[in-house]
């Protein structure tokens, strides 16, 4: 199966950093979060990627065009212009980098890569979230229910500590407990190519009309992931992921 990654948004809530590079290229542990997401898929045997580019997509292109060079020992024949690679730590991935427009919405981006997907079901996710999700189990779940679409349901982490008070006395304190128990769309979809018919045009937001219609028609199921999940929406989120990585305690590092 291929994996489609939406990597074209503006990342306005991280504007301090996205002014010079797209959000999926913000680094955790010296590597773009996009690379981390691809490693999660590769750990489950998914090594063919279709990346939907938009805002500053050239930065992502340049990263992958130079990726093997940066990870290799090389000999350069400056006179002839030849490059000889001796040792490379580059992964054996096939990556299609597709321009889907700066202002295109999530559904429109997905529909624009139709020609690169073929006739088989495919994975799809966003270029800013990581998880220790069992993608093999997700795929099996999707195949077992036989519907057109599966999303991953997660309980988002809390953003603030919680106090248990008795008057003015603090009985307990929990640092960033889980939210109120409500599940949200955590991305990490498995989709039939037939879902592309639910997308009208570039202005279609995937999370609105297409998913709502799939749900009404009984074609959308939810795979419940109870493990680690974190979207990188703010600088606070980015710092949290960086701290986990620096401490060697990054739950999403399943490779």
Image: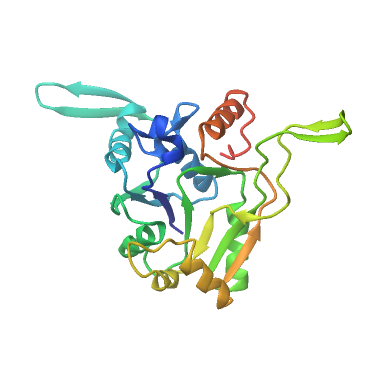
- Please give the name of the residue rendered at 46% of the width and 59% of the height, measured from the top-left corner: 1
Of all residues shown, which one is farthest toward the left?
79
Front residue of 205/58: it is 205
- Please give the name of the residue rendered at 49% of the width and 65% of the height, measured from the top-left corner: 191
The quadrant holding residue 200 is: bottom left
Of all residues shown, which one is farthest toward the bottom?
217
- Please give the name of the residue rendered at 31% of the width and 64% of the height, measured from the top-left corner: 115
Left/right placement of residue 230 relative to residue 23 reads right
Of all residues shown, which one is farthest toward the front?
167
Front residue of 239/138: it is 239
Here the colouring is rainbow
Q: Vertically, is 151 above or below 103?
A: below
Q: Where residue 167 sits in the image (x, y, percent)?
A: 89, 33
Q: Where residue 245 sits in the image (x, y, percent)?
A: 58, 28
Q: Vertically, is 47 above or below 14?
A: below
Q: Vertically, is 118 above or below 55?
A: below
Left/right placement of residue 36 relative to residue 113 reads right
């Amino acid at each position: 199966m291929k994996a489609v990654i939406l990597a074209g948004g503006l990342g306005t809530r991280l504007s301090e950093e996205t002014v010079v590079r797209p959000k999926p290229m913000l680094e955790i542990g010296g590597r773009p979060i996009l690379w981390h997401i691809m490693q999660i898929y590769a750990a489950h045997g998914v090594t063919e990627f279709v990346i939907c580019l938009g805002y500053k997509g050239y930065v992502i292109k340049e990263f992958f065009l130079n990726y093997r060079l940066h990870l290799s020992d090389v000999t350069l024949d400056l006179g002839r212009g030849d490059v000889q690679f001796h040792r490379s730590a580059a992964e054996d991935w096939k990556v299609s980098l597709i321009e889907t427009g700066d202002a295109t919405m999530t559904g429109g981006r997905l529909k624009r890569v139709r020609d690169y997907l073929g006739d088989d079901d495919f994975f799809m996710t966003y270029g800013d979230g990581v998880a220790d999700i069992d993608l093999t189990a997700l795929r099996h779940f999707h195949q077992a229910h036989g519907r057109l679409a599966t999303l991953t349901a997660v309980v988002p982490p809390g953003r603030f500590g919680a106090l248990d008070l008795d008057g003015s006395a603090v009985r307990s304190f929990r640092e960033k407990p889980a939210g109120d128990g409500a599940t949200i769309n955590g991305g990490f979809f498995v989709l039939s190519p037939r879902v592309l018919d639910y997308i009208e045009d570039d202005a279609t937001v995937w999370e609105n009309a297409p998913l709502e219609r799939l749900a009404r028609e009984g074609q959308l199921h939810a795979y419940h992931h109870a493990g680690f999940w974190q979207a990188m929406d703010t600088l606070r989120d980015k710092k949290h992921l960086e701290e986990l990585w620096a401490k060697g305690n990054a739950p999403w590092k399943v490779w």
